[in-house]
Image: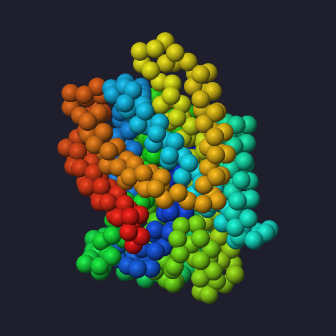
């Protein structure tokens, strides 16, 4: 009997960490890892570990705040800065949801078309994108958090096993990989090497979805400061999986010729893998890529409405602040809008609006790091045990610098297209 209980207990411990890891890994991570591997090889594998480690530090800081104060970081920020912060966050959530939702639906459509084409590629992208969005909406509305978690675990398993098996089947040079993991180097530093290395470290593990971990640990019943140790193990397992996935994509990119962008790159990579691995290798990678993009879509659909509802409803000075039914109405409304409105973005792009969105996206992670330096400071509202240590402060400052550089390079690429 004990042997049956232990695996279930283990999955309970690492569940939210797996969710935040899978939600943060999408078509963009696939593309960045593969392209960086194609251009720089596995010498920059250390950058994947650095990026995942810094995202762990950020999420661990969010968990410390929440378990110490009983509020999410968004609720705490609204309580401290009031209406201006609420308006900024709502604007950001609306823009982020629209563009990210359109990108995720497109990615699911492209991946599904490659696996089982019905019409032409453009039509299938929209058709399959709508089908995946509708499936996510039904799963979340009818099955709630338990069904969502089970489906996510299935997608995570498919994604991780197939991508790992593909990387191993390509027979990488293990000694070179070990050196790339342990010895920080940047090939072609004076050329594009620095930009790709920063992109590899900065792009791993999501942006806005980091905030969603707080809602998932609430669902898991973690509300006390004593739960911090469990959260640390949970997050360590999740970001270890994120790092392993990133390194696998680096290996894959280093072993084959890679060209393309985002979702379309899934198909390009799969076709290239047909040579060294045969048709089975192509299908394995396509299925793993589908697992990555659908789990990301499902995680965003389920979690971002929490943020929207809090941004609309939370008011610590109002008796309605704890009105859970009112919160649920806002959650359901945004879930429905998330699953439908971004369809418009699948038919075209709006460069000026995307530029504004890119600015917000570039600023989010370094601002989050600065926020954690402020909220978890000595003398702040958190308990003594939850305050930033000296090492944590140092790592958060590194995160500010790294992710600010990542944002700069992303904005430069948006502005000048290279």
Nearer the observer, 365 or 12: 365
Q: Quarter holding the N terminus?
A: top right
x%, y% of residue 223? 46, 28
Q: Is residue 333 above or below residue 48?
A: above
Q: Quadrant of residue 185?
A: bottom left
Q: Quarter holding the C terminus?
A: bottom left
Nearer the observer, 84 or 31: 84
Q: Residue at x 64, y 52 (%)?
A: 344
x%, y% of residue 262? 54, 67
Nearer the observer, 84 or 333: 84
Q: Indicate left or right for 92 with 19 as reference.
A: left
- From this viewpoint, which residue is outermost toward the top? 319
Q: Is residue 235 above or below residue 187?
A: above
x%, y% of residue 204? 43, 59
Q: Is residue 336 visible?
A: yes
Q: Is residue 201 visible?
A: no
Q: How is the image coloured?
A: rainbow
x%, y% of residue 93? 49, 41
């Amino acid at each position: 009997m004990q042997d049956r209980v232990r695996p279930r207990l283990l999955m309970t411990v690492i569940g939210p960490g797996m969710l935040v890891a899978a939600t943060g890994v999408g078509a963009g991570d696939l593309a960045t890892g593969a392209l960086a591997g194609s251009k720089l090889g596995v010498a920059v594998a250390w950058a994947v570990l650095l990026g995942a480690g810094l995202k762990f530090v950020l999420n661990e800081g969010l968990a410390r705040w929440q378990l110490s104060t009983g509020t999410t970081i968004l609720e705490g920020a609204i309580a401290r800065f009031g209406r201006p912060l609420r308006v900024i966050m709502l604007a950001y959530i609306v823009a982020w949801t629209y563009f990210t939702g359109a990108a995720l639906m497109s990615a699911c459509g492209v991946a599904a078309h490659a696996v089982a084409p019905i019409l032409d590629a453009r039509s299938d992208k929209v058709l399959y994108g709508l089908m995946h969005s509708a499936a996510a909406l039904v799963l979340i509305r009818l099955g709630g958090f338990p069904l969502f978690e089970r489906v996510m675990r299935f997608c995570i398993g498919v994604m991780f096993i197939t991508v790992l098996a593909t990387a191993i089947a390509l027979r990488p040079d293990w000694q070179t990989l070990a050196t790339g993991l342990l010895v920080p180097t940047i090939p072609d530093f004076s050329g594009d090497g620095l930009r790709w290395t920063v992109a590899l470290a900065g792009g791993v593990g999501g942006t806005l979805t980091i905030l969603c971990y707080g809602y998932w640990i609430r669902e898991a019943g973690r509300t006390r400061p004593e739960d911090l140790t469990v959260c640390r193990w949970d997050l360590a397992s999740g970001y270890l999986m994120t790092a392993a996935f990133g390194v696998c994509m680096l290996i894959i990119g280093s072993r084959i010729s890679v060209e393309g962008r985002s979702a379309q790159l899934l198909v390009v990579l799969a076709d290239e893998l047909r040579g060294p691995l045969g048709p089975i290798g192509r299908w394995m990678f396509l299925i793993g890529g589908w697992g990555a993009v659908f789990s990301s879509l499902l995680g965003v659909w389920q979690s971002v409405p929490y943020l929207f509802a809090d941004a609309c409803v939370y008011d610590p000075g109002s008796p309605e602040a704890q009105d859970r039914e009112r919160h649920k109405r806002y959650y359901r409304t945004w879930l429905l809008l998330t699953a439908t409105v971004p369809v418009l973005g699948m038919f075209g792009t709006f460069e000026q609006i995307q530029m504004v969105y890119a600015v917000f996206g570039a600023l989010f992670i370094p601002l989050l790091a600065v926020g954690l330096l402020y909220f978890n400071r000595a003398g702040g509202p958190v308990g003594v045990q939850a305050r930033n240590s000296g090492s944590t402060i140092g790592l958060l400052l590194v995160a500010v610098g790294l992710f600010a550089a990542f944002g700069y390079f992303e904005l430069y690429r948006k502005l000048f297209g290279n």
